[in-house]
Image (cartoon, rainbow, N blue to C red):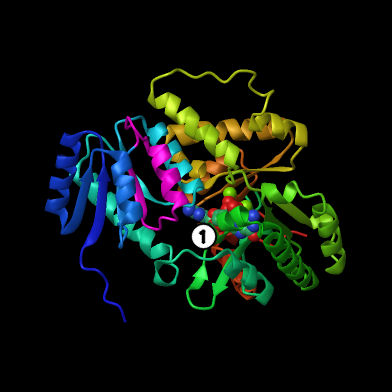
């Protein structure tokens, strides 16, 4: 067995020499790290690209003259960098968040953000988060990038399976449906989470095969549950690529017929997070303009290409509020504002509102008071293997039945 390296390798990139010195000194007081600092971003990138042992963590200033943070992590993604990135900047919180989101959409592991001037306690937290991120995302064997053929073979070999997360009607406490979430049972690396293979599937063209495999599993399971008298609705994720595929509706029809399930029992969730390449460039360019202090205005809002226009024109049945705006909304005005706005728009357009990321009682209460119809999240249940569903349902009734006037039964 290989010994784990004793010291974490860190690269810090900041065009301000003073910041570099300061962060390096703070790190020295926190623990033993092998730190390399760069004021020149292109030089830092070349050093990471050419290193025999790439760094575990890159702490990156987002506003740098020659190569800003956005360009830096696009290039890190291009070389398949598998360490963590952390963004350090004096820019606004929303700018830091947008940059972190963009980095994630490139499949990078984002350990967190560090506002400037950096504080030792926040730096310590950031390092802990990066460790957590390393642990939670199992690295492929020998640190190599997974090959696209591996996923294709896994789909064919039946190594993809689904777990199911309950969706609860907030006013009655009833189980109304589940969301199917894909997992990959890797032959040597264990369970691989979707964050590690969905972006790759999208990049390398195996998304249609993956989606078809997941729908087949999920509708098969739905039929079994319905047969057992659990009348739930099955939600399945589809990517934007699937919706651009003209053979998709026929496939779905055939799949529903094969499993004898009514299409009205199936909700197709279209993932917004799957930023297309063009959208990523848009975010990169807009963020860069922002960094250079240009002001920006959304013209023709609700008309042109905005998400809202797509919603209005396409008539969705359900709007899911992202976990980022649900969990903690009770104590965060910005989250609450976005939550309220989403509820209002959905209500006006006649859509059902599902709040994702309900992690505790405070989130649940916030959703109930603020107009969400359905809740999904760890507070009720983590995603479950199919055979754990009945036991969970019994426990849920026991735990929460008394709160609701009619008890908590599965909907029919
Ligand atoms: P999603 O569709 O938004 O699914 C919800 C994700 O939030 C799931 O992560 C779920 O485990 C997680 N989650 C649920 N409750 C909570 C909570 O209370 N707090 C927090 N922090 N997280 C919660 P998961 O399973 O890792 O899936 C991640 C994403 O991968 C999904 O997000 C979806 O976009 C994508 N995905 C998963 N399966 C498929 C699939 O079969 N096809 C496609 N196209 N995408 C999929
Ligand atoms: Mg989903
Ligand atoms: Mg979601």
Query: Which one is nearer the viewer's eye here, 221 or 230?
Result: 221
412 to the left or right of 162: right
Does residue 173 show up? no
395 to the left or right of 285: right
| Snapshot quadrant of residue 151 | bottom right
Residue at image position (40%, 58%) is 82
Q: Is residue 279 magenta?
A: no
Relative to 278, is 85 above or below?
below
Residue at image position (87%, 64%) is 257
Q: Which range of residues does the magenta coloring cover?
A: 62-87
Does residue 304 show up? yes
Q: Secondary structure at mark 1?
A: helix
Residue positioned most to the bottom: 1
Relative to 185, is 108 above or below?
above
Quadrant assignment for the C terminus: bottom right
Q: Is residue 80 magenta?
A: yes
Q: Position of residue 108 (x, y in %)?
A: 44, 51
Q: Position of residue 24 (x, y in %)?
A: 16, 46
Query: Which one is nearer the viewer's eye here, 177 or 38?
Result: 38
Relative to 386, is 277 above or below?
above
Circle 1 sits on which residue? 196
Query: Which one is nearer the viewer's eye here, 83 or 149?
Result: 149
| Snapshot quadrant of residue 370 | top right
Assign ligand 1 to one image quadrant.
Answer: bottom right
């Amino acid at each position: 067995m290989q010994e784990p390296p004793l010291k974490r390798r860190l690269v810090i990139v900041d065009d301000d020499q003073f910041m570099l010195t300061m962060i390096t000194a703070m790190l020295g007081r926190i623990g033993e790290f092998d730190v390399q600092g760069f004021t020149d971003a292109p030089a830092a990138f070349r050093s990471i690209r050419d290193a025999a042992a790439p760094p575990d963590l890159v702490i990156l200033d987002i506003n740098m003259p020659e190569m800003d943070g956005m360009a830096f992590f696009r290039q890190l993604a291009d070389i398949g960098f598998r360490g963590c990135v952390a963004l350090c900047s004096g820019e606004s919180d929303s700018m830091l968040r947008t940059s972190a989101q963009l980095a994630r959409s490139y499949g990078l592991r984002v350990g967190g953000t560090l506002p400037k001037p950096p504080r030792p306690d926040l730096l310590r937290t950031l390092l802990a988060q990066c460790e957590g991120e390393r642990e939670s995302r199992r690295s492929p064997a020998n640190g190599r990038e997974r090959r696209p053929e591996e996923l294709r073979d896994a789909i064919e070999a039946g190594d993809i399976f689904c777990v199911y997360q309950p969706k609860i009607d907030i006013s009655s406490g009833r189980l109304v449906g589940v969301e199917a979430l894909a997992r990959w049972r890797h032959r040597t690396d264990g369970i691989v989470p979707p964050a590690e293979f969905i972006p790759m599937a999208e990049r390398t063209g195996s998304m249609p095969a993956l989606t078809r495999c997941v729908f087949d599993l999920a509708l098969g399971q739905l039929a079994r549950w319905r047969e057992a008298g659990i009348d739930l609705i099955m939600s399945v994720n589809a990517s934007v690529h699937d919706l651009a595929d003209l053979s998709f509706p026929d496939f779905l029809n055939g799949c529903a017929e094969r499993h004898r399930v009514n299409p009205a029992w199936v909700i197709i969730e279209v993932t917004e997070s799957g930023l297309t390449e063009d959208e990523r460039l848009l975010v990169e360019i807009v963020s860069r303009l922002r960094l250079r202090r240009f002001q920006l205005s959304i013209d023709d809002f609700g008309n042109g290409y905005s998400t809202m226009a797509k919603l209005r024109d396409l008539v969705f049945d359900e709007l899911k509020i992202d976990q980022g705006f649900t969990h903690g909304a009770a104590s965060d005005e910005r989250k609450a504002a976005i939550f309220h706005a989403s509820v209002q728009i959905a209500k006006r357009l006649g859509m059902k509102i599902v709040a994702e990321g309900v992690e505790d009682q405070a989130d649940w209460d916030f959703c109930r008071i603020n107009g969400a119809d359905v809740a999904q999240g760890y507070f009720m249940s983590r995603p479950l293997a199919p055979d754990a569903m009945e036991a969970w349902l019994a426990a849920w009734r026991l735990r929460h039945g008394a709160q609701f006037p009619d008890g908590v039964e599965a909907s029919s």
